[in-house]
């Protein structure tokens, strides 16, 4: 039995994968559709991609760290006094 031919969609996706592109689906408000498409087009344009990527990194907040250790490592603690006086509790008569 002969192999079925690959669909045109599969061939297209393979070509895009070789170019380093992946398919992304997002949901946006109707008035933001043109903006989202414009951002995607600017990121795909070799002449503008570095500038747009740097601009977006400055404007869009980075994702939150994954662990408490990473959060504390990223926290600005230079001017914070972390010393506490030792509290021995109160005297109790038994």
Image: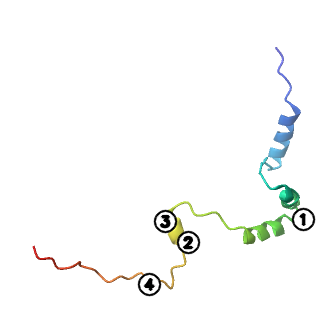
Name the residue beneath numbered marker 3: 69
* Residue 50 seen by the camera: yes
How far is the residue under mark 1 from the one under mark 4? 48 Å
Residue farthest left in this picture: 94
The secondary element bearing badge 3 is classed as helix
How are the colours assigned in the image? rainbow
Q: What label sits on residue 80 in the rendered view?
A: none
Quadrant hosting residue 65: bottom right
Name the residue beneath numbered marker 1: 47
The secondary element bearing badge 4 is classed as loop
Q: What label sits on residue 81 in the rendered view?
A: 4
Vertical position of residue 92 compared to residue 11: above or below:
below
How far is the residue under mark 2 from the one under mark 3? 9 Å
- Quadrant where the C terminus is found in the figure: bottom left
Name the residue beneath numbered marker 2: 74
* Residue 40 seen by the camera: no
Foreground of the two, 55 or 12 = 55
Instruction: Name which of mark 2 and mark 4 comes first in the sequence.
Output: 2
Contact between labelled residues 3 and 2, with CB atoms less than 8 Å apart: no
| Residue under the image location 84 percent in, 59 percent down | 32
Vertical position of residue 22 compared to residue 40: above or below:
above
């Amino acid at each position: 039995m002969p192999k079925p031919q690959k669909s045109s969609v599969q061939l297209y996706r393979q070509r895009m994968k070789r170019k380093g592109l992946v398919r992304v689906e997002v949901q946006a408000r109707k008035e933001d559709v043109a903006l989202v498409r414009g951002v995607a087009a600017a990121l795909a344009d070799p002449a503008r991609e570095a500038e747009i990527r740097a601009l977006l990194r400055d404007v869009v907040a980075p994702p939150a760290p994954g662990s408490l250790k990473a959060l504390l490592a990223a926290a600005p603690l230079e001017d914070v006094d972390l010393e506490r006086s030792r509290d021995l509790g109160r005297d109790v008569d038994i």
